[in-house]
Amino acid sequence: MTIEVLGLDDVDAPFKKNATYADLDTIPDTWVGEIIHGDLYAFPRPRSVHSRALTRLMRALGSYDDDESSNGWIILHDVEIWFGKNLLVPDVCGWRRSRMPELPDVAVMKLAPDWVCEGLSPSTARLDKGPKREIYAKAGVGHIWLADPALKTIDVFELAGKTYNFLRAAGGDEKAKLAPFPQPIDLSRLWQR
């Protein structure tokens, strides 16, 4: 089998059509692979500014992850999750402990999360805003955040039926309550270098 490695200008094109889970082994070790509607997409790891913003976001949500009551959350990053035949790797995602009381010891999750945050980059934005958002909606993911480190913004969406309604945009130095989390987040901390 021959797989053409695409240039960085083509990263939102499929890496391989009609892919299987085994095809993930064919992408470079420093890339992230996802199977969307049967095709394998592969992306370079995020740039440092992108990675730091998402790391700081996870820290800001740490109290929810530490809460082991039914009101708490399990929050993970870069975890593989099956959504039917689609294998996605959200940048950050969370499950309410009322739905997943304990973290299972598995390589790939099968339970859809309650919340997802995708960090937008030039190589992933089209898929994050399009096919991935549609897959999340079909699976019943209640909230999606689209974080853009370059613009220093987070767009918040809530599932309403089978589609997402835009709730709000937040950014810059704002301290904002972003659904589904009730405590304000100091967004200025996310964008600091």
Image (cartoon, rainbow, N blue to C red):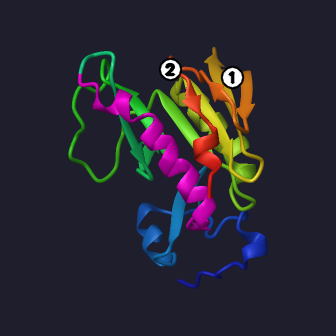
Say above or below: 97 vs 25: above
Question: Considering depth in this image, is 146 or 174 the residue closer to the camera?
Answer: 174
Q: What residue sits right under mark 2 in the picture?
A: 183
Residue 83 visible? The answer is: no
Please, what is the dominant secondary structure of the magenta stretch?
Answer: helix
Q: Which residues are magenta?
A: 41-68
The residue where tag 1 is placed is: 163
Residue 180, image x and y in percent? Answer: 53, 20
Mark 2, secondary structure of its residue = loop
Residue 120 shown in magenta: no
Looking at the rendered structure, the kind of residue marked 2 is Gln
Measure the alpha-carbon separation of dots 1 and 2: 25 Å
Residue 179 position in % (x across, y down): 57, 20
For label 1, the SS is strand
* Residue 156 x, y percent position in the rendering: 67, 28
Name the foreground residue: 19 vs 113.
113
Q: Residues within 10 Å of mark 2 (few under 14, many from 20)?
A: some
* Residue at position x 52%, y 29% in the image: 139
Q: Quadrant of the C terminus?
A: bottom right
